[in-house]
Image: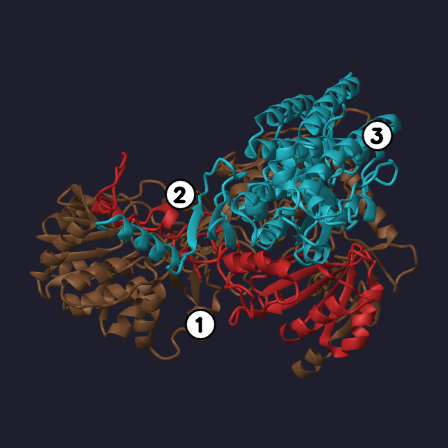
Amino acid sequence: MPETKNDLANLQEDVLDAKLSTKSLSLNMGPSHPASHGTVRFHIELDGEIITKLDPEIGFLHRGFEKSCENSTWTQCLPYTDRLNYLSSMCNNFGFLTAVEKLAGIEIPERAKYIRTIGAELHRLCDHLTCVGAMAMELGGFTPFLWAIEARDILWDRVAELTGARVTTSYGRIGGVNRDLPEGWVQKVKDSLVRVAELRDDIDALLTHNRIFLERTRGTGKMSAEDAINYGFTGPMLRASGVDYDVRKAHPYWVYDRVDFEVPLGSEGDNYDRYYLRIAEMKESERIILQCFEQMEPGPILVDDWRYVLPPKNEVYSTIEGVIGHFKIVMEGVKIPAGTVYSYTESPNGELGWYLVSDGSGRPYKVHCRAPGIPLLGGLEHMVVGSLLPDLIPTFDLINMIGGEVEQ
Amino acid sequence: MSEAVVRRIADRFGDKILRAFSQHGDEAIVVAREDLVEIARFCHDDEEIDLKMPVTLTCVDYLGEKPRFELVYVLYSVKKKHRLQIRVRVPEEDPEAPSLTPIYRGLDYWERYVWDMYGIRFSGRLKPLKRLWMWEEFEGHPLRKDFPLRGRTGQIPELDIQDIYRGPGPGPKSRPASRAAEPRPSQLPIVK
Amino acid sequence: MSEEKRTELVNVTIDGIPTQVPPGTNLVEAAKAVGVEIPHYCYHPGLSIAANCRMCLVETNKHPPGKLVPGCQITVMEGMEVTTQSKRVKDQQRAVQEFLLLHHPVDCAICDQAGECRLQDYYQEYDYKPSRLDSPKWMKNKRKVLGPTIVLDQERCIMCTRCVRFMKEVAEDPVLGVFGRGTREVIDTFPGKTLDNNYSGNIVDLCPVGALTWRDNRFRARAYFLTATPSICTGCERGCNVYLDHFQGVPYRYRPRENPEVNQYWMCDVGRLGYHALHDDRLVAARVDGEETEAEAAVLAAARKLGELSGKAAVVVSPLLSLEDALAVAALAKEGLGAKAIYVSGRAAGEGDRLLLRSDRNPNRKGVELAAQAMGLEVRAFDALQGAKVEGLLLAGLEIPADEAGFAEWAKKIPTVVAMGTNVSPLLGAAHVVLPLAPHSEAEGTFVNFQGRAQRFLAAYEPRGAALPGWAWAARLLRELGHETGWSSTREVFMDLGRKLPEGSLGTFDWDATPRRHLKGVVPLPGGTVDGRPAGMRELIPLRTGGTAA
C-alpha cells in the first residue's frame, strides 16, 4: 500500500509501462440465443471484440429426413420435404416432385406448371419477409419485424386457402398439383399483394437509408465473388457478391422462360447488399405472380396416367381398374423407373438440389437434399473472422440458415 | 448438356475415366479413388471446363455390392453453365477417400456429413474431420443400410454434479437394476 | 448317352440377350433364366400346359410375322429369337388384361388375394388404362362351398383351369370341372361330389386370383403385412419346405416353397393346419410345482432335482426337437445326468398317402437318432419306458405316441419330473418343473427328414414369453450341474456338437450355406422388396435367434 502521494505516482507509472498481456476469450454463443436464427451453437474465440475463430455446431434439429424417406413411398416423402425449409415449403415440395418427374420422364400439364410457379413465388415472398424482418429485429428494430410478420400472415392466409395449410403445405403430387385454385382466389391474391407491397415499402423506407442499419450492415460480412463460388454459395448470398447465377434464368423450368422478370445483382458482397437484394427480389416475385395470373389457361392439373396418379374416386368405387390402381399406388407406392437424377430449382436461399436414386420399386433408395444453407454456413467463418463480434449477427441472419434444411 | 466437358476430360485422362454416361440430361463420370484429386484439380483449373463451384457431395450405400459405397460429387460452372457429376466407389473394408477441400473449400461440411452418416474418412482435409449432425460420442453411422431405422446408441451419461438443481426424474445412478437387464427396443444392437 | 444330351443345349435369344437352354424348355422358363418376365396366369411348371389365358403371347422369328404364339407352350428351337417388348406384344398384353377385367367384380377391398394377386400386378404393369365397360357385370355364385376346406367365388375366377388340372393330375381326385360356355363359364364340382382331399390347400396357392379361398384362413390377414420366413413343415417326416407367413409374432399360414427333391411345389393339408399349434395354447411361463416362476428359479429347481438322481433319470426326447436341440439334450443326458440311453417319443403314426404325407408324423426322428449316436447313447423305443424302473423323468418335448391322460397318471408316481414343452398338455399335471420350449417358428435349427436330408429353418419372430430353444435350456441345466458350455447361438451348438455326428451322416449339408440374416432388431425392409409388403413396414428380426445360454 503506497504511503505517500509520491509512491502512488510511481506505482501508476509502473502499471502503465507494464507489458499488456491478453488472452483470447472462448465464448459459447449457445444453441438458444435471442440473436441467432434457430438452434445453432457457436464456439467463438475472441481477441478483444474481434473474432479469431468461429466454429458453428449444428445438429439440434436433425430428424433423420433421409432415413425416413428411404422407408416411405415416394408420395409419403412429400410431407417430409415440407419440413426441410419450413418457411418456403412449397419450394421444397415442388423441387422434390420436379426431381421425381424428371426421373420418371413425365411432363406435367401447363396449368400445373403455372400453379407451381405461383406457389413457389408466394413462399419465396414469405421466406424473404421472414429473413429481413428477423434480421431487423435482431439488430434492434422491432417494428420492421412486426410489419414483415403481418405481411407474411396475409400471404399465409392465401396459401392456406390454396393448399389447406399455412406453413407445411404438402402441396403438389407426382404429375402435377392436387388442388386447383379456389374460386375468387386470384383476386384475393392480387389485393393481398398490394398490401404486402405497402408493408414491404414501409420496411424499405425504415431500413434502407437508416444510419444505424447502414453502419451495422455496410461493409460487414464481406465475401468476394471467387471465394463465394469456391465455397459453393448460391442464391442471394452469391448474387450479392456480383455473380449472376439464378437457376430460374440459367436453366429455366416450369414457366420461368415465359414470364418477364429481372434478377437483381449486388456489388460489394456485404450484408447491406444481401438485404437490399432480398427486398428487390420480393418486387420481382410480385411481378411473376401477376404475369402468371394473366397467362394461365384452364386445363387439367394432373397428368393423366394411372401409374403415377391416383384414379378419381368415382372410378375407384365403381370399376375394378380404378380400385386396383388405387390399391397398388397406395400400398406399394408409385413405381418410378430405376436410375439416378440430380435436379435443381431456385429456392429463396439458393439452389435447392435433389439427388434421387430409385431402384424401380415404389420406395426411394436414396433421397439427398442439397440444402442451400449448408455451404453458406460453411462460409460463415470466412466472412466474420477478423471482424467484430456484433458483425456476426447480421451476417448469420442474412445467411437465412433454416435449421430444417441444414440439419434435415 | 456437358458432353464437351466429358470429352475434354477423357481426352486428357484417357483410361482413368472408368465410365462416362448421360442420364436424364446430366453427365457423370466414374473415376477411381486414386485419380480423384488430380481430375478434380483439372476440372477446377482448366479454362474451358471451369467447374469452379462445388454444388454437393453425397454418398449412396449399395449394401450387397462390392465396392459398397459410391461418392457422388456434383460440380458446376457459373460462367459456362454446365454441370458434371463425378462418382467414386469406396469399398467397405477400407472406407477412406481423399479430400477435395484444398481445391473446393465448400465441400467441408459435405465431407463431414458423409463421415457422420456413412463412415467414410477423408484424408488431407484443411480442417479436422468431425461429425456434423450427430454428437461426437455417437457410435455408428446412421444412413448406412444396415443401421436400423430406430437405432440409438447409449446416451451420454449424466454427470454426477452435486451442486446443481435436479428436477424430477431419475438421476445419474438411479436406474432400477431389474429393468436395466432387459434390452429395450431403443437399445437394439447396431451392426457397425 | 447322358454326356451327349448335356452338351446339346439350344441357342436362343430373348429380347436380344443370347442364352443356351436345354431342349424342351418353354419360352416362359427360358425368359426367366435371363431375367425377362413373360406374364402368365394359367401356366404352372408343375401342371400340364393349357395355354388358355393368352397372356404369355410373344413374337418369335420362327413363326409367321405378326402371329403371336403362347410362350408357355412353344419350346425352344435352335436360333429362335423371341421378342417380348414389341408394340404388338404390348398391345396384346394390354388387351388380354382388359378382357380379363371386364367382368371381374370390384372386390379388391374385401378379397384375400390383394397383395399377392396377379391381376393387380399385371394390370398396373401392362394395362394402366381406365375401364371401357358400359354394361353391368355378370353375376355368379360368390360363396360356393366346395368342400370342408375350400370356398369358391365364381365371379372372380378367370378360368385359368389351374385348379382343375391340379386336382386331376397331382391330387388324382378329379372333382372339379368347367361348366357352361362363353361368359357363363364357371368352375364347379361334378354333381354329387365334394372337394375333400388332403391336398385341397394347394389350389388356393395356385389360384392367381382370389376365387379359391381356404376356409380356415379367410379374412384373417392382409397379404401386404405378412412376412414370409423360410421354414420346414413339422407335420410328418418328409419335411416339406414352406414359408411361414406371420405378422407381429403371430403365424397366419404356411405356403409351400419349391424344392424339386422334397415336395416339388406342394404341401398337404395336415401340415398346413400345423400352424395353429404354433400359436394356440402355448406354454409361455416356467412353473415349479404348479406355480409360475422366473426362468432362473425353475432352472435351479430342475437342476437340483435332477442332480440328486445321478444316473437314474430317464430322458425322453421328442422328435419334434431340432437337431441342435436334440444334440444339446443328449449332451445334458450324458454329461449332466449320466444316462446311457434316451427314449424317443413323438406323435403317434398315422396313415401316409401316395403323394407327400408319410405315416411317421414327426419331422426329426432321424435327427434325434443321429444325435444319440453322436453322444454315444443308446436309443430306446417309447414303449420300453413304462417297463423300466425310473426315479426321474426329463421330458424334452411333450408329444407322446400314447394316451396322454394315462401316461400322466403313470408319471405322477415318479418322484421327479422335469418337462419342456411348447403347448399346454395334460402331461403338465404330472411335472414338477415345467420349462417353456420355443417351437420351430421361434428358433432356428435343422431337421433331418426321412431321406437323410438335413434342412435348415429360420426363426420367424422372438420366442414368446419366457420360451427358449431346447438347447438353451439344456445349456442352463448343464451350467447348474457344473458343466459350462459357452453356447450363445444355435450355430455354436451345431459347430460344437455337430462334429461328433457320424461321418457323412448329413451328406453335403453346410450350416452356413443358408443365407443368414445379419440384420438384427428393428430394421427397414431392404430397398427393392416387392413381395407385397407395404413400403415403410419394419421387420422385427428376432434378436434372440438362438438366445443366450447365460
Task: Choose the circle earlier in sequence order: 1 or 2.
Answer: 2
Quarter of the view holding residue B171 = top left
Q: Residue at x 52, y 35 (%)?
A: C218
Residue under disc 1 on the same chain as residue under disc 3: no
Q: Which chain is red?
A: B
Chain of the residue under the numbered disc 1 shown in the image: C
Q: Which chain is brown?
A: C
Q: Are marks 1 and 2 on the same chain?
A: yes
Determine whether the residue tagged by mark 3 lies in a helix, strand or loop.
helix
The Cα–Cα distance between marks 3 and 2, rounded to whole angstroms, is 64 Å
What numbered label is drawn on residue C365? Answer: none
In the displayed structure, C180 sits above or below B18; it is above
- Judged by depth in the image, the label closer to the viewer, 1 or 2, is 1
Total numbered circles: 3
Q: Amino acid at mark 2?
A: His
Q: Nearer the viewer, residue A323 or A272?
A: A272
Q: Which residue is mark 1?
A: C509
Quarter of the picture containing the C terminus of chain A is top right
> In the image, which disc is placed on residue A292?
3
In the rendered structure, the colour chosen for chain A is cyan
Residue C276, disc: 2
**Dot 1 crowding, Cα within 10 Å, few <14, some 14–19, many 20+:** some
Question: Where in the figure is residue B131, as x and y percent of width and height?
Answer: 49, 57
* Viewer can see residue C188: no
